[in-house]
Amino acid sequence: MKNKIDNTTIFRTPDGRSYLVPFILVTSLFLLWGFAHGLLDVLNKHFQLAFTMTKAESGLVQFSTYIAYFLMAIPAGIFMKKYGYKKGIILGLLLFAIGAFSFIPAALMHSSTPFLIALFIIACGLCILETAANPYSTVLGPKESAAQRINLSQSFNGLGWILGPLVGGTLIFGAPEGDSTALTKPYILVGSIVLVIGILFFFTKLPEIKEDDEKTPVMTNIPDKSIWKHRHFVLAVIAQFAYCAAQTGIFSFFINYVTEQDPSIDPEKASRILAFGGMTLFMVGRLSGSILMKWTTPNKLLVLFSLISSVCMLLVILALGRISLYALYTTFFFMSIMFPTIFALGLSNMGTLTKKASSYIVMGVAGGAFSPMLMGLIGENNMAVGFIVPFVAFIYILFFAAKGYRS
């Protein structure tokens, strides 16, 4: 019964403390950054149309976002270690709001550069939020159910991914041609919500939880290992880089691929398919993953899901019409558990190094900075060929799930 999903086990520690309320607050952050990332995939196609960019050039949307994770992850971890989770969350929300409202002056400049700078500021905030919220959700309850909690939180992240392209596609692609404020509307909305959430966190008392190995010193003659001597952690950083490269590439060029495979589908309709089809499957996959972990271990589920994702990518590369489209949709379900499960497996048994390890695993998100440009370059004339990038990434994740996760 240890792994049963209910608020008397996964949110309650053996000493009787319940972390359900803090968990709900932290989970709201997963929804927010999911929404922000979901908007990116609409921006990618919009930038191609509005600023006459090639597919590879439009990858700058993702580059300006995900490179922030690489640059900010270590400073975020240092800040968290010194000031704690709560102050880190508030700082992340503040940067998120500043970046969102920066879209207003950017719209007046009629250039892609100010938008890319605003996206970078938003991403700095998102990096801090993810560095705080991912490990925080793993310690809000018993250690044994850490992977279940983070998958549950990430399910709401999936909901944000649904709402992002839905709202963004409607407000951006649905706006009259020449409407310079089209890009600002979704960001004014999300910026306002972020400010409200930030105020709520400021006035809410959150427990500052120490990881088990921080609370109880272990007497041993074995010296502390360097973080880089934890093989499973190092392989988890690489796996997270590979996963984020795959996810970002698939999300970024979903609209391009669908419109190329079926010319009767326009970008606005493709963005709705992305929201209601792909992202819904993504959210359902994470919810299902959290439940399935009652009966199997996280690494075994990751083996199965990464294997199926690899097969789906092969079908996408072959460009078999509707079969390939269905394979692309299916991938959303099976790659859904990868980020949180890799995160939980990578942090396993890291003890006092947990916060530092979290920063490095978040740095793996930088994989999303490079894959869209690489996929765009490979798939400029035939988008299907570009999907060889996520195929290779899923093969590596399969290795990590089968062998590399062992600590």
Image: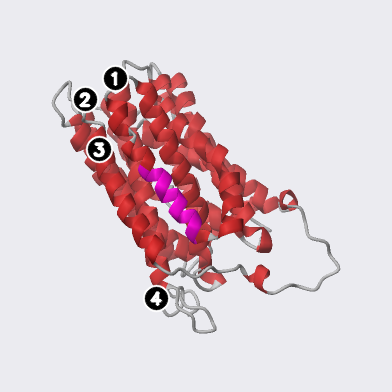
Q: CA distance from mark 3 to mark 2?
A: 14 Å
Say what amino acid the circle numbered 1 marks.
His
- Closer-to-camera residue (9/326): 9
Q: Which mark is residue 168?
A: 3
- Closer-to-camera residue (157/315): 157
Say what amino acid the circle numbered 2 marks.
Ser
Secondary structure, mark 2, is loop
Mark 4 and mark 3 lie on one chain; the one further toward the N terminus is: 4
Say what amino acid the circle numbered 3 marks.
Gly
Q: Which residues are magenta?
A: 86-97
**Mark toward the viewer: 4 or 3:** 3
Residue under label 2? 180
Q: For the residues labelled 1 and 4, say whether their Cβ atoms are less than 8 Å apart.
A: no
**Mark toward the viewer: 3 or 2:** 2
Q: CA distance from mark 1 to mark 4?
A: 51 Å
Q: Residue 360, percent across and down?
A: 61, 47
Q: Which mark is residue 6?
A: 4
- Closer-to-camera residue (60/392): 60
Mark 1 and mark 4 lie on one chain; the one further toward the N terminus is: 4
Secondary structure, mark 4, is loop
Residue under label 1? 110
In the depicted structure, whether residue 362 falls above or below residue 173 = below
Q: Is residue 140 visible?
A: yes
Q: Residue 182, percent across and down?
A: 21, 30
**Mark toward the viewer: 1 or 4:** 1
Q: CA distance from mark 4 to mark 3?
A: 35 Å
Say what amino acid the circle numbered 4 marks.
Asp
